[in-house]
């Protein structure tokens, strides 16, 4: 896998290529279908290299920052998932207002032809590009006929709800992590370095690994979930009951965190360790309890239910 962070990084002799373009936030099943079609097209044309063009930051974060959606996956995670999908190279284009002003034809010339020597371009059927999103698949196909490259628009997948990053965010906002997993083709995850918390969980008999959740990164709705915690330094995975939120039973806490209690373990040293937390099923919403006893009783039940769910969950 080759990774480039600007057009200038692409070797002059890298092409010919088959190119697919998009934000690819989440690399959900719809994205995976487009990637598979790009690989199929490359095989049919005898082209050895498939390149993904994506953008950082998300164009909406530049053009309408107040409407920028939380990201499902970081650029690093997207690159990792694209590598696992067998993509040959990723061009992460720095998106700014100068690029936003490019006409569709200028984008085609500078990115697809001059930089990547595209023989074919494979995109989702709703793909838009160029200044004010003036370019679409029909325009891309017309220019392709003139400039000598093939264009394929791939129909959107899913049903009755089309799979999309927006749909997955709506699932997460409702706490529907199983719906998000169905569209992703894998459980939704968050990654981060474990930080020291207030140690209340340890005092209550349920020590947790705490991962902050930045506001610009997606996370499930506040509540308690069954899932898995994986150490990224060793690859070890543990079943966990996971709390997302601000612990409303205790006053004064404002930082939203993902707190994972590894079932039946109080001997793990995880401070400073990068972990991945995978969400399998929602157990309940977040509740403000009248006292610690009621909280602990409910936590006992959360752990019992998480254990039952995770016995059959890979």
Image (tube, helix red, strand yellow):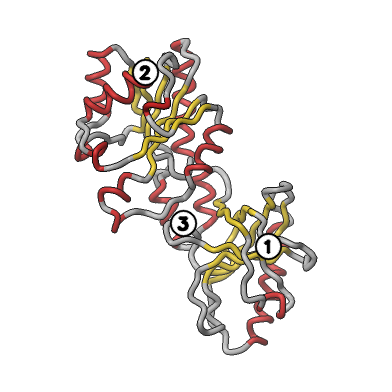
Identify the residue under disc 3.
Answer: 218
Would residue 140 be found to the left or right of residue 51 on screen?
left
272 vs 85: above or below: below
Would residue 305 be found to the left or right of residue 101 on screen?
right
What label does residue 31 carry, if any?
Answer: none
Q: Earlier in the sequence, mark 2 or mark 1?
A: 2
Q: How many marks?
A: 3
Q: Earlier in the sequence, mark 1 or mark 3?
A: 3
Instruction: Evaluate whether residue 152 shows in this view.
Output: yes
Q: Which residue is at a point 20% across and 37% down the rendered structure image? A: 101
CB within 8 Å, label 2 to label 1: no
107 vs 160: above or below: above
CB within 8 Å, label 1 to label 3: no
Q: Which residue is at a point 33% across and 40% down the rendered structure image? A: 95
84 vs 141: above or below: below
Image coords of residue 166 (percent x, y): 38, 50
Image coords of residue 222 (percent x, y): 50, 68
What label does residue 118 carry, if any?
Answer: 2
Q: Helix or strand or loop: what does disc 2 sit on?
A: strand
Crowd band around label 1 with a 10 angstrom C-alpha radius: few (<14), some (14–19), many (20+): some
Identify the residue under disc 1.
Answer: 271
Instruction: Evaluate whether residue 160 shows in this view.
Output: no
Image coords of residue 164 (percent x, y): 40, 45
Would residue 211 be found to the left or right of residue 270 on screen?
left
In this rendered view, identify the residue nearer to me: 239 or 183.
239
Image coords of residue 304 (percent x, y): 72, 69
Q: Which residue is at a point 37% across and 35% down the rendered structure image? A: 93
Q: Helix or strand or loop: what does disc 1 sit on?
A: loop
Q: Which residue is at a point 41% across and 47% down the rendered structure image? A: 165
Q: CA distance from mark 1 to mark 3?
A: 23 Å
Would residue 266 be found to the left or right of residue 76 on screen?
right
In this rendered view, identify the residue nearer to me: 253 or 23.
253
């Amino acid at each position: 896998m080759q990774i480039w962070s600007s057009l200038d990084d692409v070797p002059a002799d890298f092409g010919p290529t088959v190119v697919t373009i998009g934000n690819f936030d989440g690399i959900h099943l719809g994205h995976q279908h487009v990637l598979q079609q790009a690989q199929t097209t490359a095989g049919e044309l005898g082209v050895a290299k498939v390149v993904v063009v994506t953008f950082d930051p998300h164009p909406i974060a530049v053009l309408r920052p107040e409407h920028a959606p939380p990201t499902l996956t970081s650029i690093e995670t997207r690159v990792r998932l694209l590598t696992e999908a067998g993509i040959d190279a990723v061009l992460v284009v720095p998106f700014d207002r100068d690029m936003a002003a490019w006409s569709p034809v200028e984008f085609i010339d500078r990115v697809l032809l001059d930089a990547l020597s595209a023989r074919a371009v494979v995109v989702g059927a709703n793909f838009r590009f160029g200044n004010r999103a003036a370019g679409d698949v029909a325009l891309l196909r017309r220019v392709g006929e003139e400039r000598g490259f093939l264009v394929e628009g791939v129909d959107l997948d899913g049903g009755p709800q089309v799979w999309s990053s927006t749909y997955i965010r709506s699932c997460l906002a409702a706490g529907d992590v199983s719906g998000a997993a169905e569209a992703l083709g894998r459980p939704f995850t968050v990654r981060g370095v474990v930080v020291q918390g207030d140690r209340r969980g340890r005092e209550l008999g349920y020590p947790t690994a705490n991962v902050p959740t930045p506001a610009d990164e997606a996370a499930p709705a506040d509540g308690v979930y069954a899932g898995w915690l994986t150490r990224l330094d060793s690859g070890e995975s543990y079943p966990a009951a996971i709390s997302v939120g601000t612990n409303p039973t205790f006053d004064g806490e404002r930082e939203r965190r993902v707190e994972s209690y590894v079932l039946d373990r109080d001997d793990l040293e995880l401070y400073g360790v990068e972990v991945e937390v995978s969400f399998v099923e929602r157990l309940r919403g977040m509740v403000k309890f009248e006292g610690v006893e009621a909280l602990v009783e409910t936590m006992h039940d959360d752990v019992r239910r998480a254990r039952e769910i995770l016995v059959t969950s890979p």
